[in-house]
């Protein structure tokens, strides 16, 4: 079976606040543009490749919204983009942030006639909704296994963020504690 591509939207940053994080999964590998040290070291890109299950486990404290992409998004081209970006030493902040780079990877993997370009500030919210708006997300799954371990105020903030920013997710995600 061919590898699939999924946009991973992590709702909130650490501590249950903030805009969140974007990453892209190809098969069993998560590619995440979060290596801040790459911007200040002599070498080292912002990209990290991690085992998908391990990466999801490390982020179980916040909701993970998986959007599985249509066949238009070529898995090998996503990986090729990440490899080129790494070789170019694209750094976190200097070359954009997580959502910017995930958008570029998805765009690179699409036919030239299709442009993946979230409007406005390129945040995880924008990437998520651009994939929906363009019909690229053929299936969505939502995970939040660590919700019961969260302090009540952080949990409530995240539930309200899901309700406000990610329509329909609460219909499919058990947020009970």
Image (cartoon, helix red, strand yellow):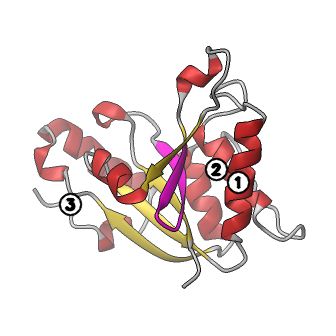
Q: Quadrant of residue 17?
A: top left
Q: What secondary structure is the magenta-colored segment mainly?
A: strand
Q: In x, y percent, where is residue 165?
A: 45, 53
Q: In x, y percent, where is residue 113?
A: 89, 70
**Residue mark closest to the camera, 1 vs 3:** 1
Residue at horizontal 65 percent and vertical 26 percent from the top: 93
**Residue mark closest to the camera, 2 vs 3:** 2
User: For the view shown, which residue lies furthest in the bottom direction?
Assistant: 1
Give SS at disc 3: loop
Side of 6 where 106 appears, left or right: right
Judge whether residue 96 is colored magenta.
no
Residue that mark 1 sits on: 105
Residue at horizontal 38 percent and vertical 56 percent from the top: 64
Residue that mark 2 sits on: 102
Q: Can residue 104 be seen?
A: no
Please rate how many residues cluster around mark 1, counting C-alpha atoms within 10 Å: few if below 14, some from 14 to 19, many from 20: many
Eyeballing the image, is 118 above or below 27?
above
Q: Indicate which disc, 2 or 3, sits on the residue closer to the N terminus.
A: 2
User: For the view shown, which residue lies furthest in the right direction?
Assistant: 113
**Residue 141: mark:** none
Residue at horizontal 53 percent and vertical 30 percent from the top: 35
Residue that mark 3 sits on: 175
The quadrant of the image that shows the N terminus is: bottom right
Q: Could you say which is closer to the camera, residue 59 or residue 2?
A: 2
The quadrant of the image that shows the C terminus is: bottom left
The reply to whether callout 2 and callout 1 are in contact (CB within 8 Å) is yes
């Amino acid at each position: 079976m061919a590898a699939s591509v999924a946009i991973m939207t992590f709702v909130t940053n650490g501590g249950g606040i903030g805009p969140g994080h974007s990453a892209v999964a190809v098969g069993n590998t998560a590619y995440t543009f979060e290596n801040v040290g790459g911007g200040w070291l002599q070498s080292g890109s912002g990209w990290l490749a991690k085992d998908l299950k391990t990466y999801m486990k490390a982020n179980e404290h916040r909701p993970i919204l998986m959007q599985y992409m249509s066949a238009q998004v070529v898995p090998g081209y996503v990986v090729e983009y990440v490899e080129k970006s790494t070789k170019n030493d694209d750094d976190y902040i200097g070359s954009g942030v997580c959502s910017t780079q995930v958008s570029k990877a998805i765009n690179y993997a699409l036919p030239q006639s299709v442009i993946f370009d979230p409007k406005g500030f390129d945040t995880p919210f924008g990437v998520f909704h651009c994939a929906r708006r363009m019909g690229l997300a053929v299936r969505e799954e939502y995970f939040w296994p660590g919700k019961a371990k969260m302090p009540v105020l952080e949990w409530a903030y995240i539930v309200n963020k899901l309700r406000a920013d990610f329509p329909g997710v609460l219909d499919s995600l058990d947020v009970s504690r």
